[in-house]
Image: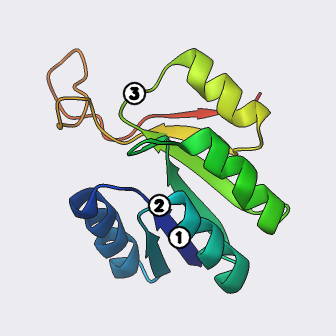
């Protein structure tokens, strides 16, 4: 699968890339909305993992641009700042789902038993 990872945090973007590449996926990176649109237009990824907050850019605005340059492209919005309202709005704008990348403090969310739970997702009904 050809995957585009869009995140302004270099370390997180490269960690995601490395993880996906070890699973056999071809991965391209973008740090800005403009780069994401350009790479989507030219590479036509099968899936885009799009950060909700790209510095001063709003990932939901970037989502709209990605769908403009590549109608139907599959996009998963990733964020450390997940909320039900954000998930609903992202899916209303065409995201397949949202995925919590990590807690705002930089660690994976913990379950009530104290173990790491990994990313959480919300899917369309």
**Residue assigned mark 3:** 81
Left or right placement of residue 61 versus residue 79 in this view: right
Left or right placement of residue 94 versus residue 49 in this view: right
Residue contact at pointers 1 and 2, CB within 8 angstroms: yes
The tag earlier along the polypeptide, 3 or 2, is 2
**Residue assigned mark 1:** 35
Distance Cα–Cα, label 1 vs label 2: 5 Å
Number of labels in the image equals 3
Distance Cα–Cα, label 3 vs label 2: 18 Å
Nearest the camera: 10 or 21? 10
The answer, for residue 35, to whether it is visible in the render is yes
- Residue at 52%, 53% in the rendered image: 50
Residue contact at pointers 3 and 1, CB within 8 angstroms: no
**Residue assigned mark 2:** 32
Task: Report helix, strand or loop for mark 1.
Answer: helix
Q: Residues within 10 Å of mark 2 (few under 14, many from 20)?
A: many
Q: Residues within 10 Å of mark 3 (few under 14, many from 20)?
A: some
- Residue at 47%, 79% in the rendered image: 28
């Amino acid at each position: 699968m050809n995957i585009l990872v869009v995140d302004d945090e270099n370390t997180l973007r490269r960690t995601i890339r490395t993880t996906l590449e070890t699973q056999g996926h071809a991965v391209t990176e973008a740090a800005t909305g403009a780069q994401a649109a350009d790479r989507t237009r030219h590479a036509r990824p099968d899936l885009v993992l799009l950060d909700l907050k790209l510095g001063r850019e709003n990932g939901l605005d970037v989502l709209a641009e990605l769908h403009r340059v590549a109608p139907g492209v599959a996009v998963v919005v990733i964020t450390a700042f997940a909320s039900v309202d954000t998930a609903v709005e992202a899916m209303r704008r065409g995201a397949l789902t949202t995925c919590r990348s990590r807690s705002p403090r930089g660690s994976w969310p913990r379950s009530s038993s104290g173990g790491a739970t990994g990313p959480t997702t919300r899917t369309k009904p």
